[in-house]
Amino acid sequence: MKRVLVIDDDRTVRMLLKVILKKAGYDVVECANGKTSLKKAESFKPDLILLDLMLPDINGLQLLETFTSKENLKDVPIIVLTGSTDEENKLTALRSGAVDFITKPFLSEEVLLRVRTQLRIHSLIHSLQEAVEKLQDDVAAAAKIQKALVPVSTPQGFRDRVNWIYEPSYNVGGDIFDFIKLNDEKELIYLADVAGHGVKAAMLSVIFHRFVEDYVENIKNQGEKLELSKLIRALEDNFKFDKFDLFITTVAVVIDRKNMRIEIGNAGHPSPFFMKKKDRKTFFVNDPVESMLGLGLVEGKTKVLEINRGDRIYLFTDGVIEVVNSSGTQFGLENLKKNLEKNIWSKLEESVKDLFNEVKTYKNGEHFEDDVTIIGIEFTG
């Protein structure tokens, strides 16, 4: 039963409103002045208040402001009762937080219509607030799960230098990556980006992470060697767009320390940046770049590059190059290339950090709309 508090110094008006509302099934409590109404409101905990603007001991507008300033009463809808000539008071009341007004003299149908309408609106707002809070809890939980899967340190036995920065957007995003030791001579690094934000994108990135983990573990248990092209085709077969309704891009690198080479596969992801330290040659590995996963277009093509001690490769998501400054211009590949080239002799950690800082400065320190992930790998030979 909804509770209504009636505050009016006119006993006839109070009785009339009480009869109208009780007959409609409401629990009604009445007050004749402002002094007792505040205590009554705090103990009765009304769902709605009918407040006369002309009270003997306090101005009704002042009482209205008191109600709306109280933490435990500020969300209670207040309908003011006012004389037909109080037009300015009506407007002032609405500006001060009242949700509606009833003009005296009134009809019982009007009272019930306005009360029911405001209680329904208040109920809808409350339901919406609960839904938003639940969604925020879900998003926070999804972000926590996703973040737990992002490496916090280089895995034990991983022999090449690796450094990274992962900066989630203000929305939960879909960047996920991992470093997996295949054997004493080979290591796998992958970076994936699920398009979109929210719980759905975050959970799909978690599923992606688990799939790669299980795939590699099964290969090891069967005593087989990982073939990068087969892994990419398996991802293509298992992450169909029509199943998840989200696009996924990924780039994966297998480091072969014994033969001093790397194998790269790319399904719709921004091309990695490869840096030959000895002769200071730098280039984007644009071949191969296949379609994003799940459209039936990925064949599992890979490319092999020779490496030497000190060479580096940088993986990154499109959140880096698509950052937009105040003038609407994207950071882009050329700015990324220039930044990495100027840090060719810097330590790997410093080069990754400097790139991230430049991207953040480009964004004027504002929150990123998309996840920003940068991974630097230096081959130790």
Image (tube, rainbow, N blue to C red):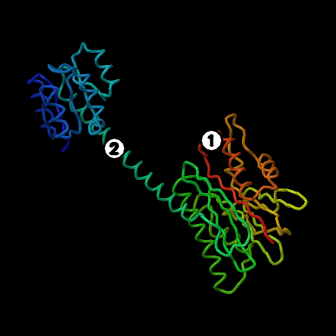
Disc 1 from disc 2: Cα separation: 35 Å
Residue at 31% x, 39% y is 122
Say what amino acid the circle numbered 1 marks.
Gly
Left or right, residue 370 beside residue 26: right
Q: Quadrant of residue 374?
A: bottom right
The residue type indicated by label 2 comes to His
| Residue 290 picture quarter | bottom right
Q: Secondary structure at mark 1?
A: loop
Disc 2 marks which residue? 126
Local packing at callout 2 (Cα closer than 10 Å; few below 14, some 14-19, many 20+) is: few
Image height of 296 relative to 95, above or below: below
Which of pointers 1 and 2 lies earlier in the amino acid sequence?
2
**Residue 294, position in %: x, y?**
66, 63
Vertical comparison of 318 with 222: above or below: above
**Residue 254 circle label:** none
Residue at 15% in and 25% down? 8
Relative to 264, 55 lies left or right: left
Residue 11 locus on image (x, y percent): 8, 24
Residue at the spot 26% in from the left edge and 15% down from the top edge = 86
> Is label 1 or label 2 in front?
1
Along the line of sight, the residue nearer the viewer: 353 or 99: 353
Query: What residue does disc 1 label?
Result: 365
Secondary structure beneath dot 2 equals helix
Residue 61 in percent (x, y) is at: 26, 22
- As drawn, the residue found furthest toward the bottom would be 223
Q: Nearer the viewer, residue 254 or 245?
A: 254
